[in-house]
Amino acid sequence: MISLRRRLHAARSAASGRVAAFVALSLCMLPLLLSTACNTEACLESKTSIFNTAFYAYGDSGVKVIIDSVSVYGVGQYRDSLLVDTANISSFQATLRSGRDTTQYVIRYDQHNLNPRYKRDTLTFVYHSYIEFESAECGAMYNYVIDDFRYTTWQIVDARLMTTEVNNQDVETVRLYYYVPE
């Protein structure tokens, strides 16, 4: 009987020791849990790296222009990559593929008076990517550095790469210049 009481007392002591350890650990962890649970800084910025392409008049004016009846789509992408479908636009946004080092986009001019030979220009981006840790809330994201930029000149007169860094900041990456009749 005495042996049973000792075992019961020992079990109660061990259980109370585990409870005490749990309470002590909980009290130590409470400030950490509250600081992350009450974090008011949410991830408000985009976690996608995009490049912005804008259209300009060629020449001294440098005025931003609207190109009518334009479609923009990706080349060799396995999903639907139509970004713009026959719209009047002055710019567009697109992404680079993280698993590749080259991405191409076609700008198709859907005006009826154009010779079919001159209906498409292609933009080619050669780049390398790197992962950047943003924050605990936002996590990590792919950013890109453009190593080479090429384009066809069926309708585009000139093009300029304004920055080689592609990240989640809303900046103009590429300027495309077109002849615009006076």
Image: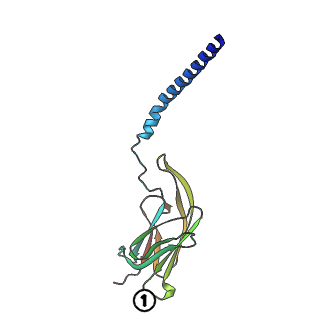
Instruction: Locate the C terminus by quadrant.
Output: bottom left
Snapshot colouring: rainbow
Along the line of sight, the residue nearer the viewer: 54 or 34: 34
Query: Dividing the picture into quarters, in which one does residue 162 lie?
Result: bottom left
Inspect the image, locate mark 1, and give the three-letter code of the amino acid beneath it. Answer: Asn
The percent coordinates of residue 28 (x first, y second) are 49, 29
Instruction: Determine if residue 53 is in view.
Output: no
Q: Is residue 19 left or right of residue 62?
A: right
Q: Residues within 10 Å of mark 1 (few under 14, many from 20)?
A: few
Taking the spot 50% from the left edge, 87% from the top edge, the residue there is 116
Which residue in the protein does label 1 denote?
Answer: 113
Along the line of sight, the residue nearer the viewer: 5 or 138: 5
What kind of element bears circle 1?
Answer: loop
Taking the spot 65% from the left edge, 11% from the top edge, the residue there is 1
The percent coordinates of residue 152 (x first, y second) are 52, 78
Taking the spot 46% from the left edge, 32% from the top edge, the residue there is 30
Identify whether 171 is placed above or below 58.
Answer: above
Along the line of sight, the residue nearer the viewer: 106 or 62: 106
